[in-house]
Amino acid sequence: MASIWKQFTQREASPLIQFIKYAICGGGAVTVHVIAFFLLAWLIIPALNAEDVFVKLFHLSCAPISDAIRARNAMINNALAFLLSNLAAYILNILWVFESGRRYPPVDFFLSKLGLIQHATLRACAHRTVEVALFYAVSGIAIAIGTFLMGVMINQWHFTTTVAFGAQCVIAAMINFAMRKFMIFKS
């Protein structure tokens, strides 16, 4: 039991414990995404209507808006929430699950052509920038498809924002899993 606990408190862990830690970080990122999305949708960029589950659950008031505006605003809110939640996911994964620092040969090639390969700090910064960009790119494709479909669900099919948002989360998670499994990591 002490061995299992030790794996949870350090970065080195068995594949099962690492997966559990990854899932916990993912749950934290989803929580950040949901909270950010609904706060934006309620307080800053209106995307809720009176029939929405979130509005009824928390007894909120909201001004009536058309489905087209609600769809547009929900898509904007989702993009903003994605930026925040993906940053949370990256930070949690780097601090608790994975070790940062993978080397990307194209970065070293580019720096060598500029005569900057010997600058360790610049090289580390360039590799970290690429790492973050790839992390966002993989998730960004999934969230873009899910966000587009969320807009269609609201504007064309008249779903409530909460139902469309929930469906978007499931769609994005499925696409994200498939992309990482078959395109990023070894199967």
Image (spheres, rainbow, N blue to C red):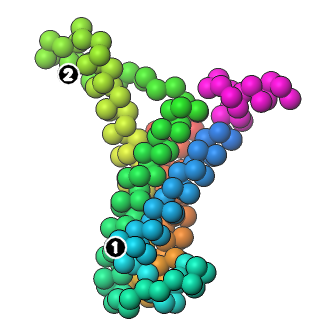
Neighbours of disc 1 within 10 Å: few (<14), some (14-19), many (20+): some
Q: Is residue 15 magenta?
A: yes
In this rendering, is residue 25 above or below 143?
A: above
The residue shown at (55%, 78%) is 54
In this figure, which residue is indicated by the disc labeled 1? Answer: 45
Which amino acid type is shown beneath numbered disc 2?
Phe
Residue 158, located in which quarter of the rendered image?
bottom left
The front one of 154 and 37 is: 37
Q: Taking 128 as reference, is 19 left or right?
A: right
Residue 97 picture location, percent across and down? 58, 33
Q: Is residue 65 visible?
A: yes
Taking the magenta stretch, the answer to whether it contains residue 9 is yes
Placement of 125 over or under 34, stated as above or below: above
Number of disc labels: 2
What is the magenta segment's predominant secondary structure? Answer: helix
Q: Are marks 2 and 1 in contact (CB under 8 Å)?
A: no
Nearer the observer, disc 2 or disc 1? Answer: 1
Neighbourhood count class around disc 2 (C-alpha, 10 Å): few under 14, some 14–19, many 20 upward: few
Q: Residue at x 36, y 61 (%)?
A: 79
Disc 1 marks which amino acid?
Ile
The reply to whether residue 151 is visible in this rendering is no
Extreme-right residue of the structure: 1
Can you give x and y, in whole percent of width and height, for residue 34 in the image? 51, 63
Quadrant of residue 4 within the rendered picture? top right
Q: Secondary structure at mark 2?
A: helix
Which span is picked out in magenta? 1-18
List x then y, in percent, for residue 131: 37, 33
**Image: 180 above or below 147:** above
Q: Which mark is residue 110?
A: 2
